[in-house]
């Protein structure tokens, strides 16, 4: 059985006080309301991870993610945060290769592959993001493009390490636009990607890999999207900034 996962990517939002309130509300609601077989992850800005980790840690089905990490182990890289630092404060997951990092910070698949390695070496779970732009969606070859992001970012891994990775399919045209992929479009891509995983690692490993959908997912559309056979949860942006809505999404399976 694949893990069901709902992760909230807060991006660059919230003050410290607001972050503490949001996290403690989410933690209480998850404890009281969310099925224990659903893993709920929050990904606050890095500055708040140390504090908020103490909120999530006591809850068995909760995790805390960084939104990024350095591809370097340590040293003279001003402003960067290493995977080992994240590990040392109890971070469980790291989002790697979000389209905003690829787009605004020019992160290449090569760098992302290094980040995936360093996250795994430090015993955390990479949430590896992929997804096509609107232009690509309107043209041809977007399935192959998204598959190539996986090939270049994670297909160097051994089967054992690959089994520790979570994938998030986030069509760029659906991120923050209110334009969600239809559940059929999400299912179509997820099934295609699972086939791609199977071609490299075999069906059994592909069937164990959680593939999350991200892009304007909210409490109204989550149930329909999560009901698709190859959709194993969501990576939630805007709707993760409201505790009630985020928890409702986590209850949508
Ligand atoms: P929205 O849910 O705001 O569209 O963002 C999705 C996302 O980028 C999550 O990583």
Image: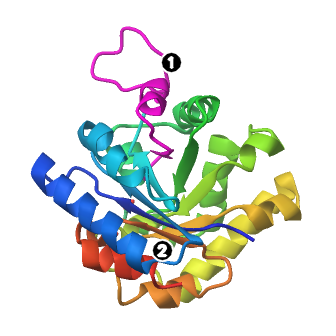
For the point 58% across and 32% down, the residue is 110
Name the foreground residue: 245 vs 173.
245
Name the foreground residue: 24 vs 240.
24
Residue 151 placement (x, y as % from top left): 70, 47
For the point 61% across and 55% down, the residue is 166
Provide the residue designation for mark 1. 73
Q: Is residue 216 visible?
A: no
Q: Which mark is residue 138?
A: 2
Residue 143 placement (x, y as % from top left): 63, 66
- Residue 13's place in the image compared with 204, above or below, is above
Q: Is residue 173 visible?
A: yes
Secondary structure state at the residue bearing disc 2: helix
Name the mark nearer the viewer: 2 or 1.
1
Is 86 a magenta residue?
Answer: yes
Secondary structure state at the residue bearing disc 1: loop
Q: State the separation of the CA atoms marked 2 and 1.
A: 40 Å
Assign the N terminus to one quadrant of the image. bottom right
Range drawn in magenta: 70-98
Q: Residues within 10 Å of mark 2 (few under 14, many from 20)?
A: few
Judged by its main secondary structure, the magenta piece is loop
Judged from the image, the quadrant occupied by ligand 1 is bottom left
Q: Image check: 100 left or right of 147?
A: left
For the point 36% across and 90% down, the residue is 220
Of callouts 2 and 1, the N-terminal one: 1
Residue 193 placement (x, y as % from top left): 69, 65
Mark 2 touches mark 1? (CB < 8 Å): no
């Amino acid at each position: 059985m694949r893990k069901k996962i709902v992760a909230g990517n807060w991006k660059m939002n919230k003050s410290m006080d607001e972050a503490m309130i949001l996290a403690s509300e989410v933690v209480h609601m998850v404890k009281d309301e969310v099925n224990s077989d659903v893993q709920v992850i929050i990904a606050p800005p890095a500055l708040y991870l140390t504090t908020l980790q103490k909120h999530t840690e006591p809850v068995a089905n909760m995790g805390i993610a960084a939104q990024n990490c350095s591809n370097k182990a340590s040293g003279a890289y001003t402003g960067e945060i290493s995977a080992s630092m994240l590990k040392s404060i109890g971070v469980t997951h790291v989002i790697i290769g979000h389209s905003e990092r690829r787009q605004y910070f020019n992160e290449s698949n090569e760098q992302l592959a290094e980040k995936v390695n360093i996250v795994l070496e430090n015993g955390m779970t990479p949430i590896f993001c992929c997804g096509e732009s609107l232009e690509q969606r309107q043209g041809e070859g977007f399935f192959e493009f998204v598959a190539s992001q996986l090939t270049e970012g994670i297909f160097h891994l051994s089967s054992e390490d690959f089994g520790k990775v979570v994938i998030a399919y986030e069509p760029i045209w659906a991120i923050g636009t209110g334009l969600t992929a239809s559940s059929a479009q999400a299912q179509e891509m997820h099934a295609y990607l699972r086939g791609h995983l199977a071609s490299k690692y075999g069906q059994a490993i592909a069937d164990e890999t959680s593939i999350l959908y991200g892009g304007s997912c909210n409490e109204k559309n989550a149930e329909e999207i999560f009901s698709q056979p190859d959709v194993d949860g969501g990576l939630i942006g805007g709707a993760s900034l409201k505790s009630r809505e985020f928890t409702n999404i986590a209850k949508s399976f």
